[in-house]
Image (spheres, grey):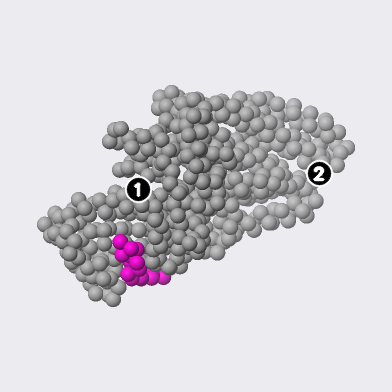
Amino acid sequence: MLKAIFYKEWIKLRWYMLLALIVTTAVAGYCLLRADRAIELRGAGHIWEVMVLKDAVFIDLLRFVPLLAGILAALVQFMPEMQRKCLKLTLHLPCPQQRMVFAMLAAGVAMLVACFAVNFAVMTAWLSAVLPAELVTNVLSAAAPWYLAGVAGYLLAAWVCLEPAWKRRVLNLAVAALIVRAYFLAPVPRAYNDFLPWLALYTLALSLLAWISVARFKAGCQD
Amino acid sequence: MTRICKIFLCATLAVLAVWQLPWCYAFLTTKATPNSFVMYSSLLGDFILTRYEEGDGIVRRDVAGRAYSEAETDSLLPMFYMRQLVADERFPDTLFGVPVSPREVQNTSFNFRMRPSAVNAPQTGIYFLLESMPKRVELEMPDDAFRFTHAGIEFITMETNAADAEKSARFTRMLAQKGFAFPPRLVSGNPTTMKDYDNGYLLLDARGRLFHLKQTAGQPYVKALTLPEGVEAEHVFLTEFRDRKALGFLTDAEHRLYVVRADGSVVRTGLPAYDPERDDLTIIGNMFDWTVKIASRGVTHYYALRADDYALLKTYDVPTDSGEIFGLSFTSPYDRYVRPRF
């Protein structure tokens, strides 16, 4: 049954994920291209200097892109489910409801992580050719909380989407905005390094929130 | 399961409240507190406090409260207000029996500031070693960068991102010959061309010993500097002041501040305590005295030191309102890391 759920989510998300993959990779590629142009025009030394002395990472444009990708993934996956009341049908499938809801979320998270992994692979491959490992780590460590925000954005948007009452949705949205703020506090690269594993654990735990919305949906909560 | 999820939501809401409410309170209620600018006057033998007072405008007083006019303050702080005194044709020929000239004042005066956020910050581990004896007058950034490894120092040519094995071996050999233990605990330098000359780096090696490294005519210059008996160095700060009398500052595990002189000697200052990880340090120095400001939580200490032997001349403490409100925060003015802290 889980396999079928994963397949169902794949069918729902595959085109969006392809688009997300193209857009996020294109933005990452554009950031790298800009760095490449800067190397062409000013020399590699200039890039190294501003990265070491000014904490430049050259991928600032990418900052909110994973978050947007995560939020849109949740909307694509769960908005039709709620609008067409498909969730009611899904919950009647012969499978434990919790397992099914978390499997749906897991499918979305897995696809997002795969998309983000491609971004990371592209950045690592290009950066490693022109920068030492320390500066590559600088860039990737600056990007890590942004990508984690993408996963958090997906799980929080799922929580908001699955919520049956509009008033509560607005409240959830405000809480979600405050939670997401915690992923964008880095003043410098590597600032999150010690905290990142805990933030990753917390991000995964955010999937618990969606179940509250489903439980309220099951209880028939409405505006 | 639903209960666990609700507990998680409540915990999240509690954390958000403890994080955001104090922030909102601070954001809405923070008011500008009038700060004094404090300088020690060797002519007066006391600190002069310059501050804005409601109704009176900018007032200048000594610690006892005696007021001074602007012109009097200029004369009492001739090294600091040198340009004004020169413009007014009031700059003295001698001070304390020592002939002084505006050029000499310029060359011997310095400002040094070190914030905790600069000390408690992630390090990249990539450094630039400038040529300290450049052929041209102006300094130039090098074509290579370096890193320390457990085996030595490694120079990387930036254009090709490839290691320069020959230069790396030359510098590693010289450091090893001088007894340097890799990798260093601390590396302090100022790799910029916006300075008069280059002092290279002050290093604390793996065993906590102090070394001076620079590049002279393309060759490594390494000098082991002897620390005073029983001193366990904790932080070093390289300086490049115009008078070239100092290599930098050093603090030890007991939070005592030392001056690393250009001849390699390490001399303790009269400051009672300075913790670079918690205190904000400002030194405004001239050829006769240094005014040292150490801003700690709850109090700002001002110290006057004699410039030649760093003996403590006078102290003045000002209690301050740190403005900190109890709550959760993920960032801090004391460091550049993101992590939860109360």
For residue B246, above or below residue B215: below
Magenta highlight on residue B305: yes
The amino acid type of the residue labelled 1 equals: Glu
For residue B286, above or below residue A184: below
Viewed as shown, does residue B71 lie left or right of A122? Answer: left
Viewed as shown, does residue B166 lie left or right of B245? Answer: right
**Most distant residue in the front direction:** B177
Q: Are marks 2 and 1 in contact (CB under 8 Å)?
A: no
Helix, strand or loop under label 2 = helix
Note whether residue B124 is visible. no
**Most distant residue in the right direction:** A94
> Which residue is the site of mark 2?
A98
Report the label total.
2
Which portion, as a residue range, is magenta?
Answer: B304-323
The amino acid type of the residue labelled 2 equals: Gln
Crowding near the residue tagged with mark 2, few <14, some 14–19, many ≥20 C-alpha atoms within 10 Å: some
Q: Quadrant of residue B192?
A: top left
Give the label, 2 or 1, closer to the camera: 1
Helix, strand or loop under label 1 = loop
Residue B282 image position (x, y, % from top left): 37, 58
Which quadrant is the N terminus of chain A positioned in? top right
Note whether residue B285 is visible. yes
Magenta highlight on residue B5: no
Q: Residue visible at 41% across and 57% down?
A: B266
Q: Nearer the viewer, residue A147 or B258?
A: B258
Q: Nearer the viewer, residue A34 or B206?
A: B206
Q: For residue B240, which numbered disc appears in the image?
A: 1
